[in-house]
């Protein structure tokens, strides 16, 4: 029976899932696919909701809600991070799994997209409580994940230690060592050199490519980075080391600005494990002021929906490179594109993390590990190829960079679905 497609146009584009579905529909239609393909790919094929009981340090048991979404496995096993955050919700996890599919498609990886999350605030939990929560999550989702099913990784407020606990718990359940079950692990447990800074390295490569297209020199270029977590802090360092001036950075407490360039080494040394540093300073500005600073490159590296219709006409950057997931709404994308600002979308710009996660998975499967130079060279090659493919389609079809990225990203999966005979 032919699937009936329900149109998604006209929905609030601040809803990350709805806005993703709008662009997925447009991309698939431009590629010549019909309603049946849109109906299949507009939602994850599987979403698991779990309740995780955790014995807290005070002796009481608290129940946490967790999710795991698997978008589509026509190309291969699903792949994607697990975030710990109080604002995690099912719609967000679904959208993130679709974005992971697009990232994998752009990078030509043998994966579909997956994503997980737990509603919690790790900043208010002890080390042992986090361990119990991490292990409990793996026990809850163990039936649908695995090295050839669905491979988790770090995401917002999770790290290599949490991945180590998760790998150990999965290995206990399966009764054999399973390093390929999860990526972003510590090196001694099968992690890959270059993984911790991979997302930032990928974003830095995209900045260099975008600036070359716009005829802007990196030396002395003014960079603003919103967010100073893992991706934002490493990116600020890479751009500073390349000769650019990082004139602004921010975290959840506020933002710092210096038109002569900030001391990035000092800020990285002072920040805490969650990327907080501005609370140590008095002369701060707001995140909204940071976004509208006059600069060459603006990098939103924090959370969703930061550049919206309410501030898009005040953005003064020449280039926007999205290191975060979903920082620019669809209406804001249209506004900044119409103003001549080159926007490098998240599904392209932040693909470095999943690319090096793929490298880690390959190394785990082979039992042979690469040097950091090899990892960096392979990462650069794949990121530049992805950028060129998206930019070429953007120029050829005269569509914005976001739509071009979605078209490149969804094409491989749609073809795999067609060839398997699913639609």
Image (cartoon, grey):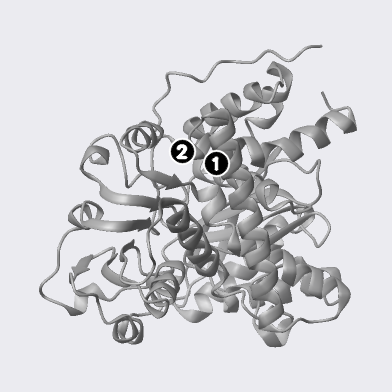
The answer to the question of whether label 2 and label 1 lie on touching residues, with beta carbons closer than 8 A, is: yes
| Left-right relation of 60 to 68 | left
Quarter of the figure with residue 216: bottom left
What residue sits 55% from the left and 64% below the top? 202
Is residue 50 visible to the viewer in this orientation of the structure?
A: no
Q: Which circle marks residue 16 in the picture?
A: 2
Q: Nearer the viewer, residue 78 or 138?
A: 78
Residue 189 in the image: x percent, y percent?
72, 83
Q: Nearer the viewer, residue 313 or 54?
A: 313
Residue 222 in the image: x percent, y percent?
29, 65
Report crowding for label 1: few under 14, some 14 to 19, many 20 or more residues within 10 A (C-alpha): many
| Left-right relation of 352 to 256 | right
Q: Nearer the viewer, residue 280 or 49?
A: 280
Quarter of the figure with residue 43: top right
Quarter of the figure with residue 80: bottom right
The correct choice, above or below, for 100 with respect to 37 in the image is below
Is residue 399 visible to the viewer in this orientation of the structure?
A: yes
Q: Which circle marks residue 95 in the picture?
A: 1
Residue 244 in the image: x percent, y percent?
34, 72
Residue 41 in the image: x percent, y percent?
68, 31
Q: Secondary structure at mark 2?
A: helix
Which mark sits nearer the N-terminus, 2 or 1?
2
Report crowding for label 2: few under 14, some 14 to 19, many 20 or more residues within 10 A (C-alpha): many
The correct choice, above or below, for 362 with respect to 298 in the image is below
Q: Which circle marks residue 241 in the picture?
A: none
What residue sits 41% from the left and 80% below the top? 241
Q: Quadrant of the N terminus?
A: top right
Q: How far apart are the two marked residues, 2 and 1, measured between alpha carbons?
A: 6 Å
Q: Secondary structure at mark 1?
A: helix
């Amino acid at each position: 029976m032919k699937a009936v497609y329900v149109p998604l146009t006209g929905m609030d584009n601040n809803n990350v899932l709805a806005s993703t579905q709008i662009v997925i529909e447009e991309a698939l239609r431009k590629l010549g696919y019909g309603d049946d393909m849109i109906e299949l790919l507009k939602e994850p094929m599987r979403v698991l909701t779990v309740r995780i009981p955790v014995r807290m340090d005070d002796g009481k048991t608290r129940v946490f809600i967790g999710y795991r979404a698997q978008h589509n496995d026509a190309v291969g096993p699903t792949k994607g991070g697990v975030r710990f955050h109080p604002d995690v919700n099912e719609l967000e996890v679904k959208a993130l799994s679709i974005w992971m599919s697009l990232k994998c498609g752009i990078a030509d990886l043998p994966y579909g997209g997956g994503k997980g999350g737990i509603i919690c605030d790790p900043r208010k939990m002890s080390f042992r409580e986090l361990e119990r929560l991490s292990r409990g999550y793996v026990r809850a989702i163990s039936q649908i994940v695995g090295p050839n099913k669905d491979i988790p990784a770090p995401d917002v407020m999770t790290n290599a230690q949490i991945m180590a606990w998760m790998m150990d718990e999965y290995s206990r359940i399966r009764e054999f060592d399973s390093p390929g079950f999860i990526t972003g692990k510590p090196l001694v447990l099968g992690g890959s050199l270059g993984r911790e800074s991979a997302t930032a390295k990928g974003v830095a490569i995209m900045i260099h490519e975008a600036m070359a297209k716009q005829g802007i020199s990196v030396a002395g270029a003014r960079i603003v980075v919103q967010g100073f977590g893992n991706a934002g802090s490493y990116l600020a360092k890479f751009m500073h080391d390349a000769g650019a001036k990082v004139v602004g950075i921010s975290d959840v407490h506020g933002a710092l600005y210096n038109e002569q360039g900030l001391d990035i080494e000092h800020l990285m040394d002072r920040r805490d494990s969650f990327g907080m540093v501005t609370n140590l300073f008095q002369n701060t500005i707001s995140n909204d002021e940071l976004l509208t600073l006059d600069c060459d490159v603006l990098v939103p590296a924090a959370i969703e929906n930061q550049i919206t219709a309410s501030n898009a006409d005040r953005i003064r950057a020449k280039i926007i490179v999205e290191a975060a997931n979903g920082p620019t709404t669809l209406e804001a994308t249209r506004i900044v594109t119409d103003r001549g600002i080159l926007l490098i979308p998240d599904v392209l710009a932040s693909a470095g993390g999943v690319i090096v996660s793929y490298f880690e998975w390959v190394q785990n499967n082979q039992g042979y590990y690469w040097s950091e130079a090899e990892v960096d060279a392979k990462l650069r090659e794949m990121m530049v190829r992805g950028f060129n493919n998206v930019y070429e389609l953007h120029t050829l079809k005269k569509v914005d960079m976001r739509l071009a990225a979605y078209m490149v990203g969804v094409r491989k999966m749609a073809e795999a679905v067609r060839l398997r005979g699913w639609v």
